[in-house]
Structure formats: C-alpha cells, structure tokens
Amino acid sequence: MTGLRIGQGYDVHRLVEGKKLILGGVEIPWEKGLLGHSDADVLTHAVMDALCGAAGLGDIGTLFPDSDPQYAGADSIALLRQVAALLREKGYAVVNVDAALIAQQPKIAPYKAEMAKNLAGALGVERDRVNLKATTEEGLGFTGDGSGMAAQAAVLLEKE
C-alpha cells in the first residue's frame, strides 16, 4: 500500500466593492475584493480544501465554520498554517501543490511569485513545491463577467 494521497480543492467568492482583494496572502490593489466570512482568499481556500481532502480532514468549512465568529475576517494564510500543523500531526508531508486562479481581472502575474512564497512558507515546504497558474475565461460565466473569482488546486501528500 502506498503512502501517497491526492486531494483536489475548489473555491469561489463573489467580487464586491469596499473589500480588499487578498490572493495567496497578497493584498492586490484593485477596485473590488472578495466577499466572505474570512479574508475570502479564494486561492488559499482551494489549496486548504485540497490538503484537507488528501488527508481525510473533511473541508475548511468543517475546520473553520463561517458560523464561528472567531473566523470573521480571518487571515487565510494563518488558517493554512493550522491545516499544515494538522497534516504534520497525522504524519503527512506535502509533496507538491498545483493551483489555478480563474479570474478575468486583475492580472496577477506580478504577484504570483509572492503568492507561491506565502503558500510554501505557510506549509513549511520549499518554494519550488508550489506552482501557481492563472487563467481568464474569455469573458464567459461569473468569472468572465467579473462578478466573482474561482480557484482550483491539486495536492500530493506523502505519509512520513
């Protein structure tokens, strides 16, 4: 039996005025931000859900419910550190993370390296174990019309 575990995560949040846009723990200057109970970091949430799935921890809604006031406005990178600690307690190491942000705008290329560094740092892994991509949807759907953003992530864990 192998000690490898694969997980996939998906998250989506609505874009609204008057909120900060936080992606991968980076505040990106833009006219809109993501709406959510925490900081609504859609990218970090997808990564956390993928990690939780691979380790059999359920999902981030189970670990950090939006009905709990202690998570109101929570820093998602700090929550990712908590997920990483749970993984270590269960004897898992992160082999790699591959994530994609789906948004029409803003362009995130100038921020991808810092986002990957933040995610890797929170997970306690080398930077080259975290890969980030971004894509538009050619103006189609809620991400294409600018009313929201989505993210997908795949992870591989190894039992230590």
Image: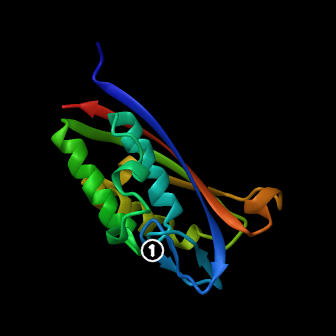
Q: Residue furthest top?
A: 1
Q: Quadrant of the C terminus?
A: top left
Q: In what element is the residue under mark 1?
A: strand
Q: Give the x, y percent position of residue 64.
A: 36, 57
Q: Residues within 10 Å of mark 1 (few under 14, many from 20)?
A: some
| One can see residue 125 in this view | no
* Residue 116 visible in the picture: yes
Residue 61's spot in the image, x, y percent? 43, 52
Q: Residue at x 38, y 49 (%)?
A: 62
In the image: residue 136, left or right of residue 112: right
Along the line of sight, the residue nearer the viewer: 33 or 128: 33
Residue 36: give x, y in percent of width and height.
52, 69
The picture quadrant where one finds residue 144 is bottom right
Say what amino acid the circle numbered 1 marks: Val
Q: Is residue 75 above or below residue 84?
A: below
Residue under pointer 1: 26
Q: Position of residue 35 (x, y in %)?
A: 57, 72
- Name the residue rendered at 60%, 87% in the picture: 18
The residue sitting at 59% across, 77% down in the picture is 33
Whether residue 75 is situated above or below residue 8 in the rendered picture: below
Q: Is residue 82 left or right of 42 when viewed as pictured?
A: left
Q: Residue furthest front?
A: 67
Q: Name the residue: 56% across, 82% down.
A: 19
* Residue nearest the observer in this picture, 13 or 51: 13
**Which of these two is toward me, 6 or 86?**
86
Front residue of 78 and 93: 78
Position of residue 55 in the picture relative to residue 25 (left or right): left
Q: Is residue 35 left or right of residue 119?
A: right
Q: Is residue 39 above or below residue 32?
A: above
Q: How is the image coloured?
A: rainbow
* Quadrant showing the N terminus: top left
